[in-house]
Image (cartoon, rainbow, N blue to C red):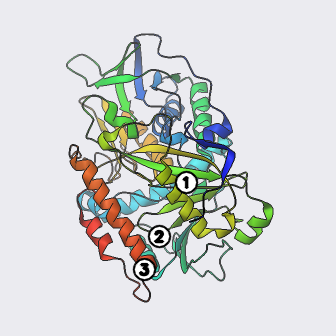
Amino acid sequence: MRPIPRSSRFANGGVSFWFRENGLPERRAPLPGDGDYDVCVVGAGYTGLWTAYYLKKDQPDLRVCVVEREFAGFGASGRNGGWLSAEFSGSQEDYARSHGKAAMVALQRALMNTVDEVVTVARAEDIDADVVKGGVRLIASNAAQRERLETHIDYLQEWGYWPDDIHMVDLDHAPPVSVHGAVAAGYSPHAARVHPAKLVTGLARVVEALGVEIFEDTAVTEIRPREGADRPTVVTEHGTVRADHVVRATEGFTSTLRGQRRRWRPMYSSMIVTEPIAPELWERIGWEGRELLRDSAHSYVYAQRTADDRIAIGGRGVPHRFGGSEDKEGATQPQAIAELWRSLTGMFPDVADVPVEHAWSGVLGVPRDWSPTVNLDTGSGLGWAGGYSSSGVSTSNLAGRTLRDLILGRSTDLTRLPWVGHEVRGWEPEPLRWVGTQVVRGLYRTADRRESRTEGNGHTSRFAGLATRMPGN
């Protein structure tokens, strides 16, 4: 692999390139002391802000506050790959077993509608987030990946995607994206490119204008349920907030709360972004439709063409750190940078001399069954949503609308979706969790290497089969 060209402005961490480009927001004041509200949301990422937005839009007299340890969008909401898509990370079969196949199909269709919902709200609220709804293209680079992609599309068409929603495309007649070595491709129109930091900071501005109080630099140490006549409480370093309902919207940082350490596993995704690419290179690459791009490897990568003509590409470089340790600054490890560069130049050899300008990472919250959930416990007064794994930009919006209906006591199509109330047991303690993650990651990467070298076989490697069967893969 050729050395990675690095810009003189090359940065690693600093939250994310998105915030470096957009500018870090001016910090809002922390909680001034004890408070009393109708709804207190913990976490000012997409989930928390969408929940507050829809509550105040539907019931303006509600007293709503959002409490955030850092600043709005500090976590995955400001660090992700800018993929607003209808992809669903959970198990369709698990939800169908509990609620029936029709309910799972309804959930998938709701996610497709969610893509349009976010685009519509951003436009209506004057949030300029570089949104382009170009769909998503799925690329296969060898025979095994092609077989797996075709099987995956057939599978999705049994679970809520119709042929117009996802299908294989003829590379000779599709809009040109010159991915080196591509042997097949699929396409879905239900996806849009966004600038994550612009979306989350714009949403925070809109929510505040609606009358929601956002308190930043306010670390929450504990969320206590309703006990007897006492209301749920949020304990912070600056005071205690009491509310009729408390929503935990902490995603990858959930394990930092008392009693939540094993609920969701912190998993890290890493990203790099190039300097702006010259027009003559774009003429060779194509990608005029600005669709999202993902490969079909087991250790897959995802990419977008940014508004200022860079390529931003991400993947699970070093997904799990022992003990779920935090990296507050978003720095990513050299190994992850090298792996992403290898994937980028493998797909687009023409950019091999374009410097990398920024690398960063973000943490996701992953349930043991990889299936996201939304819930409101009316007895304790506590609600929560998360565990999105790899589809949080869209899923968080659907979660926010669902939490609104649950908190307002409505029975709607959203509250009847099968992820509402879904529960799963916690992860194993360390070091079992770390060891298992390393084994699964190693098996998938071995499978990718073997599939790329296999000629004429065209089948998924048995190493991937072993990884898939491991608990909590």
Please identify the residue farthest to the top as the structure is shown: 33
Q: What element does badge 1 sit on? A: strand
The residue at the point 36 percent across, 77 percent down is: 460
Tell me where residue 334 appears, x and y as whole percent: 50, 50
* Cβ–Cβ under 8 Å for marks 1 and 3: no
Residue located beneath label 3 in the image: 144
Q: In this view, does 97 lie above or below 216?
A: below
Tell me which residue sits at (57%, 77%) in the image. Answer: 182
Q: Does residue 244 appear left or right of residue 67 in this picture?
A: left
Q: Residue 83 carries which label?
A: 1
Q: Which residue is drawn at 42% across and 72% down?
A: 449
Q: Which amino acid does label 3 sit on?
A: Ala
Q: In which quarter of the image is the N terminus?
A: bottom right
Real-space Cα distance between discs 1 and 2? 16 Å
Residue at (35, 36) in percent of width and height: 254
- Amino acid beneath label 1: Trp
Residues 465 and 3: in front is 3
- Kindly tell me whether residue 47 is visible in this rendering: yes
Which part of the image, by quadrant, shows the C terminus?
bottom left
- Of labels 1 and 2, earlier in sequence is 1
Q: To which quarter of the image does residue 405 belong? A: top left
Q: Mark 2 points at which residue?
A: 296
Q: Can residue 82 be seen in this view?
A: no
**Which sits earlier in the primary sequence, circle 3 or circle 2?**
3
Determine the CA span between mark 1 and mark 3.
Answer: 25 Å
Across and down, in percent, residue 456 comes to 43, 89
